[in-house]
Image (cartoon, grey):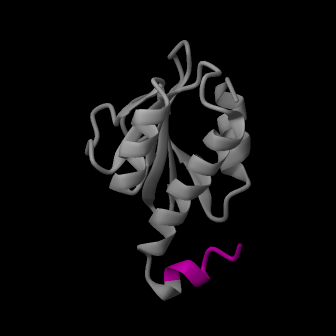
Amino acid sequence: MHSTADVRGVCAALPGSRETFPFDATTLVFKVAGKMYALTDLTADPVTLSLKVRPEDGEALRATYPAVQPGYHLNKRHWVTVTLDGTVPEGAVCELLAGSHALVVAGLTRAQRAGLGG
């Protein structure tokens, strides 16, 4: 996974995922039930992807991969920013995206989760 198109493809497959631009025209934010679970800068080269993580997972990821840093302009305990330079395996990036989505979904009400339909 190296491109914004790759990220968009993975996110499109997640239940209830929506693309938004709440900040500016280049910051693509992925939301589920109106809550952010991933964001990327469309102009970044290499592509970076910020994701929600459990704090202990974020620490382990940062210790394992130099391309994983504390979330840029986000809560550093609960978000990481991954530089998609090929050093983090594609499968791991996909798992991180799905995990970020799952963390947000877990915080939704039962009715909101039921409305996702996936």
**Residue plotted at (47% across, 64% down):** 103
Question: What's the magenta region?
Answer: 112-118
Question: Which quadrant: the C terminus?
Answer: bottom right
Residue 72 lies, with reference to residue 108, above or below; the image says: above
Q: Vertical placement of 39 versus 88: above or below?
A: below
The quadrant holding residue 2 is: top right
Q: Which residue is more in the foreground, 70 or 26?
A: 70
In the depicted structure, whether residue 16 falls above or below residue 82: below
Can residue 33 be seen here? The reply is no
Name the quadrant containing residue 63. Answer: top left
Q: Nearer the viewer, residue 100 or 39?
A: 100
Q: Is residue 115 located in the magenta-colored stretch of the structure?
A: yes
Image point (60%, 30%), residue name: 88
Can residue 7 be spotted in the picture?
yes
Quarter of the picture holding the N terminus:
top right
- Would you identify the image quadrant in which residue 8 lies? top right
Q: Is residue 21 magenta?
A: no
Residue at 70% x, 45% y is 10
Q: Name which residue lies at 36% across and 36% down.
A: 23
